[in-house]
Amino acid sequence: MSLLALLIAAQITNVADAQDEKHPLEIDVEATWLHLRSDTTIARERSSASGIQLGDELQQTRKLDAVELRLAMGLWQDLVVAPYALWDAQDWSALPGSTLASNTISVSGCGAPGSCTTPQPIGVVPGKSRRSGFFDPTIGLAWSPVNEERDARPRAGLFPQATAVATWTVGIDYTVPLGGKVDDPARALVGTSRPEERQAHVLTAWTAFSRRFGVLDPYLKLEGSAPFATGKAYDNCLHPELLSDVAVANCSGPWKGETGYRPPYEGAITAGSEWVAFEDRAADRRFSVDLRAGVRWHGPSRGYTQVTDLLGKLSSADEYVTTTGQLALYGRIARWLHLRVAGLVGRDSAHFLTDESIGEDKDGDGKITISQGTGAPAPDQNPNYDFRVDQPGRRLRAEPSLFWGVSGTLSLNF
């Protein structure tokens, strides 16, 4: 869940300006506090006489309090963003009719004689997990090849007239996997706290446009992200005891390097407008209201989902879409002091949280051979595959969920 990116406080097409005649080098220092909460109902497929049905299993809640520090310098319009989680808490509880406690299916399947006859609860329910610490930091470059204020040079006044050009900003950001202690979801099973680092290189390219029309300043932003997990990222095979019976052989054999963290590709579009209630350009003062909406696509992944801590391992999720709406109040008291308060509400579409593939033909014999708990060699079977929750008819699914957040930003400009 990439909620931190949704409450970025900066104005979308604004970069630290190194080409202002009065201020040839600008430095921006920002601190943002934010609180986010999401509530998700998790359902499970169940077989019935009429086919596969969905039944509610869990209610999952996540609460995040974080501080985001940002430094931008106008020489080349570069920036550094370092988010820190003060408190990242997840709690889950069973809903009426839950089948997790009465489950009799083995993680390895029920192919062996006499297997899967006694209850084998899936996870600890109710349960909780706690995290804190730095997220991986982001560095980036942003440049405005066309800037309406710089190029059109509108006259000073309370409300300048519409300019002849629009502002166009392009940027590229790089999330840096600096190291430290990687988030190990298996530690959730023993109740210990964990860090937030996930060890992935993430490249994000974006472009944004805005143009002032009297009191309105509409804008549009497009972005896309490509992630690449590092060799230090978490791999489920670090704990083969939580996987199926083939894990010991297959993790070090044909599936080596294919069972770890696989963050999603993402794409997003954001559109909105500022309504400038007051502006005095000569005195560098401004008060405005910012209303925006966004859509973000998350590709298929193997990562930190709503059931990762329940299972103690990374789970494979389907693609889904996040829609958001945000309202913010922005005040520039003076050139060197900016304040912003924002509220956010959003919705994630429904998607499966456990959808690992059962395997692939590794030995080239034209078929996929699986063990299904018999203990027989099965090099084709994916050691990540969990017969309890990955098999169609038993999968876990996040129902459409609502989240909300608030943030406050203080920015000093030199």
Image (cartoon, grey):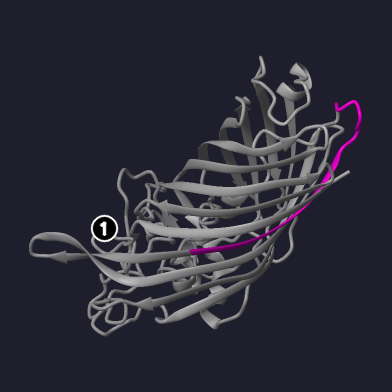
Name which residue lies at 60% across and 80% down: 192
Looking at this rendering, what residue extends furthest in the left direction?
Answer: 49
Quadrant housing residue 374? bottom left
Question: Which quadrant would residue 282 be assigned to in this image?
Answer: top right
Name the residue beneath numbered marker 1.
392
Looking at the image, is 402 positioned above or below residue 213?
below
**Crowd tier of the residue under label 1, counting other residues whose Cα lies within 10 Å: few below 14, some 14–19, many 20 or above:** some
Per the image, label 1 sits on a secondary structure element best described as loop
Membership of 63 in magenta stretch: no
Asked whether residue 122 is in view, the answer is no
**Residue at 39% across, 55% down:** 356
When asked about the image quadrant of residue 214, the answer is: top right
Residue 385 visible from this viewpoint: yes
> What percent of the width, then of the height, locates residue 335?
83, 41
Q: Residue furthest bottom?
A: 118
Relative image position of residue 222 (x, y in whole percent): 55, 32
- Decide if residue 110 is on the left or right side of residue 174: left
Q: Position of residue 291 (x, y in %)?
A: 53, 42
Q: As rendered, which of 173 and 233 lies closer to the eye?
A: 173
Q: Which quadrant: the C terminus?
A: top right
Up-down relation of residue 204 to residue 355 (above or below) = above
Tell me the magenta residue range.
19-37
Q: Residue at x 66, y 70 (%)?
A: 132
Q: Position of residue 336 (x, y in %)?
A: 84, 45
Question: Which amino acid type is marked by label 1?
Answer: Pro
Number of marks in the rendered image: 1
Q: Is residue 3 left or right of residue 104?
A: right
Residue that appears at 90% across and 25% down: 21
Task: From the viewer's side, name the closer residue of 339 and 6.
Answer: 339
